[in-house]
Image (spheres, grey):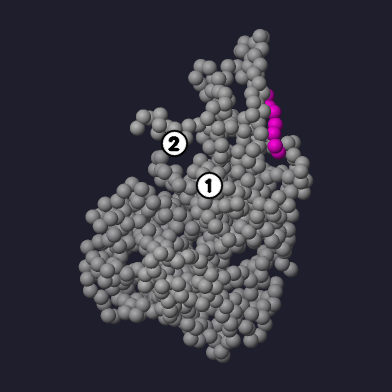
Amino acid sequence: MKSLIVASAFILLSVSAMAQLDKNPGANHGNRFEQLDFLLQGPNEYRTASGAPGPRYWQQRADYDITVDIDEPNNVLTGTETVTYYNNSPDVLTYIWLQLDENFHRKTTESVRATTGGIRGSISEQTLAGIDNERLDGLGVNITLLTDGSGKSLKYTINQTMMRIDLPVALKPGQKFVFKVNWNYKLNRKAQGDRGGYEYFKDDDNNLYSITQFFPRMAVYSDFQGWQHLQFTGGSEFALTFGNYKVKITVPADHIVASTGECKNYAQVLTPTQLQRLQKAKDAKMPAFIVTLDEAKEASKKKSTSKKTWIFEAENVRDFAFNSSRRLVWDAMTTDIEGKKVWCMSFYGKEAFPIYSKFSTRAVEHTLKVYSRMTIPYPYPVAQSVEANIGMEYPMLAMNFGRADASGNYTQAVRNSAISVIIHEVGHNFFPMIVNSDERQWWWMDEGLNSFCQYVAEQEFEPGYPSRRGPAKNLVSYMQMPREDQEPIMTKGDAVKSVGNNAYAKAATGLNMLREVIMGKELFDFSFKEYAKRWAFRHPTPADLFRTMEDASGYDLDWFWRGWYFKTEPVDIALDSVKVFQSDAQLNGKDVYLYELSVSNKGGMVMPVIVEWTYRDGTKEKETVPAAVWMANEQNFKKAFRKSKEVVSIVIDPNLETTDINLNNGKWPSQSTPTKFQLFKQSGQ
């Protein structure tokens, strides 16, 4: 009963393979404007042709009751969980799949053994250890118990980062299965960029724990692909099932814990002073300290040998993570999201204090407000930012980077980088924590949509904010790269070579061009919001996004999805010639100048043609010819324009709003843009 998705959505598509998608080869029309239906899974009872969930849409659910303990002296995590898995599908299941993501660190996994690299002239002891992955010895998940709800042992098979549990009795539609897992693993001492583990601070002999992907998690079983059990290789992230969580976290008694969910026992784990500050912060308009810098420094000087258990609960989330350390400063405030109070909190060490105490919680609040306007109102009770020297996201919890130097100073670039990563990681609460796309298959549906919203939020954070991704002009250098060095956005997650340029920047830029050049903000914003509303707390596919954007806007955008997401052709629109005609007579008392523009498509990607006119009197005018101008002939067209003033120059896409890779062939009179070297020589330096 599963609908099919064409293989092109899952595999790396070469340029030659993409050319075969054209049903009118050799013609100068009818290929780039061909409808996308044959590339997408067909509509059915679960997913409609409009892009909305169908009348029989379903998804699975998994509830977790977890107890976890951190052994600080040995850096070992031990846990036990009871999982209740609900089969809401129409299918009978004879086994289920779980993710054991920490096995990514095990030296026997294929992703580790497939690591490439040569041998340098000099080989250190560390390099030798890395060749046979000696540093990974002892890492990976140890399953110590697996039973059903009655205590009977279950048969299981582990394939690298995935674990299959064979069910003793087939799980029929509408039934649930309860099982218990006990496990432990040695925590990885992480470097910057690692997704979890612990960071050691030599100056005060303390750890900051970032506990992520720490428990056996249910894989997604869906209507469009069955079990999603692609291996975690350290790149593209997770496809996960929604459920409710009850988690008890036992850590040293002097630790502060930031976690997914609401803490249910602050009165037991906080000091009276901390608890009083937290209660006052409920009505604070500015971030208030729950733990001050001096208190965090003092706590770092000695280590408690006793322990405390923090209790958190979270409803309707797809994952759970937490941070724990005695060296954390903590500030908090609440903000109003459509009449509901939401906690905004930040946790950070002394290294990040100069930046995070000023900007972190403010950026959290700003992100929630902008994203709530663009998508749906933030539904959770808290959003947190933790400076953990990584950029990772979990429900209600963002782990970010951004530290000052040893003297407490920081550059504007470091400050902006910290603000951007906070907005980005907190923004992930919406994509994919709520609109639950599958990054393992479609990296861009998570990162690209979030990076687009990040750009909108950054531009509203303060005037002139230097956004890195989103503006079309920032993508031109990537689009100028040889075609063989690129891949379509629709490429399977881990097969994407240049993730930042592709899954983040190109996907985000595409949405920004739709909003600012092709559709207009009003129609785009309505359609994008409709997509978020339809697929909040559900599992969307690219087809659901494409169809919803068209359904809600009334725009046929198949030409755009086809060119921008399924192909690698750049935008290169040339102004080949201009014919000028001046009439002796006037029209309505105004002079008449006629201009015939001959325009050609050198790059292949059709796009609206933005024309900037400069008149004899020094004034300028800009107008946009819609992409439909290419429909009759995808290679070239001629178009006449009537003006009441004499034109002295014409430029196509002067501000690079469509990522045109060659401005030199889009100017009249013909002129070349000087290179940076030519400008240097002209300066006489």
Left or right of 538? Residue 1 is right
Looking at the image, is 369 positioned above or below residue 655?
below
Q: Is residue 638 magenta?
A: yes
Q: Quadrant of residue 606?
A: top right
Looking at the image, is 14 positioned above or below residue 470?
below
Please state which of residues 145 and 656 is positioned toward the viewer in this rendering.
656
Question: In the rendered view of the protein, which quadrant contains the N terminus?
Answer: bottom right
| Percent coordinates x, y for residue 413 in the rendering | 36, 48
The residue shown at (50%, 46%) is: 470
Marks 1 and 2, Cα distance to the nearest angstrom?
18 Å
Q: Please give the residue where the numbered disc 2 appears in the rendered image.
A: 676
Mark before the other along the chain sequence, 1 or 2? 1
In the rendered structure, which segment of residues is drawn in magenta?
634-641
Q: Please give the residue where the numbered disc 1 appears in the rendered image.
A: 478
The residue shown at (57%, 78%) is: 159
Label 1 sits on a secondary structure element that is helix
- Which residue sits furthest front? 121
